[in-house]
Image (cartoon, rainbow, N blue to C red):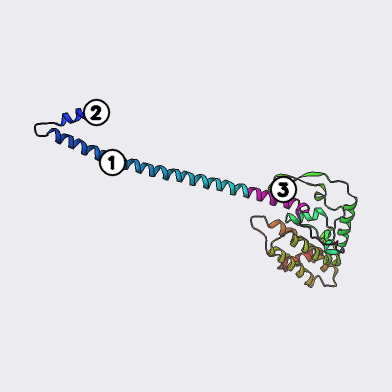
Amino acid sequence: MSARYQATRTAMITPTVTEAQAAETLRTTWVLTNEDLCLQWQEQVVEDERLSAERKRLAEEEAERERLALQLEENTARADEKKKNRSKHSTIILRPRPFANDEEALVSEFALRKIDSGKYVELYYWTNQGLDDALINYRTRDDDSMVPSIGEDGSTVWVSAATSKPAAGVIADRDLSPVDFAQAIPRIMAAIEERDWTKQRVVMLAQFWGAIMLHCYWNSNDLLARRAILLYQEEQCRAWHSAILSSNGAWNISIIDEPTLVRTFECVY
């Protein structure tokens, strides 16, 4: 028996409380206190396990978020790299060399870079003369250097020197012959489809150029009318491409703006 217990029991003995009663009271108190402490300990164990499981869950969720963020970053970087270096990542079909035709003609790298960035580019690059110039320049060039350029986000990017130089003899759309124009349209349409332009824009441009070649000005015997519709085509395309990223946005270019076309004819006249 401990001295502390003995002292407590002795203090409880009074004329009305016997030693046995004091001992029983102390025992009962100890049992109840011990049960309460055991219950508290069990509750604390459960709470500690809950907190540990919660910390583990949060740590696993954070690790998963970091993994997904890293995966997204890697996928984005890989997609950007593939976009910048199409020739390195494009799939090669296991087949004999096909016969050359217009659809596989070599197009200016400068023009294709404009197409890749969704910007306006002259139809000249898809005319017979433009394709011939691209082939000659490809065969005779000896400059494979890289030059700095400004990306769409304003950052500096390095591009091939060949993609940064327009053709020396490029002809404006307004000065193309109807034959050159008609040759260029299916070729540039194939180029923009191949370079993942949205279906809406592809259809819109196809309808626009179709409307140009079906317009009465296009088939007119009046040379000024034909010049006016080619000039209208060029100005509308330039303005449309510039407006795409503006605050007001672009419009449905396939709808011929007759009042503007008439004013263009008056300017040419």
Question: For residue 228, which quarter of the picture?
Answer: bottom right
Residue placed under numbered mark 1 in the picture: 36
Residue 98 on the magenta segment: yes
On screen, residue 40 versus residue 78, left or right, reads: left
Above or below, 96 against 140 in this view is below
The residues colored magenta run: 72-99
* Element assignment for label 2: loop
Residue displayed at 9% across by 34% down: 16
* Element assignment for label 3: loop
Question: Mark 3 packing: few (<14 Cα in 10 Å), some, or many (20+)?
Answer: few
**Nearest to the observer: residue 266 or residue 59:** 59
Residue placed under numbered mark 2 in the picture: 2
- Which residue type carries mark 2? Ser
Image label count: 3
Query: What is the spatial separation of the Cα atoms under label 3 and label 2, in whole angstroms?
Result: 86 Å
Considering every residue shown, the one lying at the far front of the view is 1
Considering every residue shown, the one lying at the far left of the view is 15
Above or below, 101 against 61 in this view is below
Q: Which mark is in front, 3 or 2?
A: 2
